[in-house]
């Protein structure tokens, strides 16, 4: 990897977190050990989604930059973290580190070669889904089929939480989102959302190049995903993306690149 300016990070790692006091210490420790081995500056940022436990205190004690947010769901926290990040590149990853941080090294070459957005994928040759119950895999494939039909084609896995993009691209896209933008409403409890679909829909519409890269992914036994509640919420988000598009809410993108989506 090429080095960024000495006084600025090459990479910002953004972790959205809601009541992650149990899992976050291990995640932060692993990522900080990884950062210590790199010859360039990496910023680590936790976007605390209004946690009611000690998530924010744990992150602060670990010397991590923390955003203190109202509880408005994962999509809002991811957006806030990405917009606050300072790195030339921004990596989004989940608080349980389901995709090992070393998988970033599979995404990075594509960014170096001009891709605007590079997303980890649990599908495709080389991808590994470790410990996932069969019914969860089936649910995921059904959801992705609906995403393909309703809103977004050409992407095999929209929901893997491991995504990277250039700083300017992140700012452009997250300033365009509507569903979990600055006016997002407060929520109750853990709120897993399909913010990814809107983000990638906008990326395609704006002509940003998107590359899918197969990664290793571990199913978390302590997952906050509620199969019924979150499936319905995610489907609602996907439908809302299509409705927003029909209403012209995503018009007037400035196409910086020719559109390209592919599997890396």
Image (cartoon, rainbow, N blue to C red):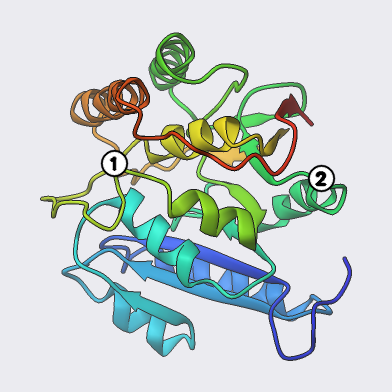
Determine which of the numbered discs, if any, sits on residue 116 in the image: none
Residue behind mark 2: 110
Figure quadrant of residue 43 = bottom right
Query: Mark 1: few, some, or many residues within 10 Å (few <14, many ≥20)?
Result: many
Q: Position of residue 12 (x, y in %)?
A: 61, 69
Q: How many marks?
A: 2
Left or right: residue 71 versus residue 225 is left
Give the class, few, some or many, for how many residues have Cα within 10 Å of label 2's Cα (few <14, many ≥20).
many
Can I make out residue 233 in this image? Answer: yes
Image coords of residue 4 (percent x, y):
80, 77
Q: Position of residue 48 (x, y in %)?
A: 32, 68
Q: Is residue 78 left or right of residue 258?
A: left
| Residue depicted at 48% across the width and 28% down the height | 132
Q: In the structure shown, which secondary structural element does the residue marked by tag 1 occupy?
A: loop
Mark 2 vs mark 1: which is more N-terminal? Answer: 2
CA gap, disc 2 and disc 1: 28 Å
Q: Is residue 201 left or right of residue 255?
A: left
The spot of residue 87 in percent (x, y) is: 64, 72
240 and 107: which one is in front? 240
Image quarter where the C terminus lies is top right
Residue at 30% of width from left, 47% of height from top? Answer: 180
**Quadrant (top left, top right, bottom left, bottom right) of the N terminus:** bottom right
The quarter holding residue 110 reads: top right
Relative to 244, residue 168 above or below: below
**Observer able to see residue 100:** no
The residue depicted at 40 percent of the width and 17 percent of the height is 143
From the image, state whether disc 2 or disc 1 is nearer to you: 1
Disc 2 is placed on an element classified as: helix
Which residue is under mark 1?
179
């Amino acid at each position: 990897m090429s080095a960024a300016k000495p006084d600025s990070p090459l990479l910002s790692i953004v972790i959205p977190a809601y009541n992650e006091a149990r899992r976050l210490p291990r995640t932060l420790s692993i990522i900080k050990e990884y950062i210590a081995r790199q010859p360039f500056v990496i910023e680590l940022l936790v976007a605390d989604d209004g946690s009611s436990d000690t998530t924010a205190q744990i992150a602060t004690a670990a010397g991590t930059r923390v955003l203190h947010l109202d509880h408005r769901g994962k999509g809002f926290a991811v957006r806030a973290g990405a917009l606050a990040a300072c790195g030339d590149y921004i990596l989004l990853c989940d608080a349980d580190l389901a995709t090992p941080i070393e998988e970033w090294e599979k995404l990075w070459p594509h960014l170096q070669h001009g891709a605007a957005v590079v997303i980890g994928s649990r599908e495709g040759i080389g991808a590994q889904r470790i410990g996932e119950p069969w019914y969860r895999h089936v649910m995921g494939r059904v959801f992705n089929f609906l995403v393909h039909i309703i809103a977004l084609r050409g992407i095999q896995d929209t929901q893997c939480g491991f995504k990277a993009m250039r700083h300017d691209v992140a700012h452009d896209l997250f300033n365009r989102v509507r569903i979990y933008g600055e006016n997002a409403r407060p929520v109750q409890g853990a709120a897993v959302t399909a913010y990814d679909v809107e983000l990638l829909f906008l990326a395609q519409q704006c002509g940003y190049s998107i590359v899918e890269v197969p990664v290793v992914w571990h199913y978390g036994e302590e997952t906050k995903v509620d199969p019924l509640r979150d499936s319905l919420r995610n489907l609602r988000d996907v439908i809302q993306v299509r409705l927003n598009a029909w209403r012209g809410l995503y018009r007037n993108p400035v196409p910086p690149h020719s559109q390209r989506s592919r599997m890396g």
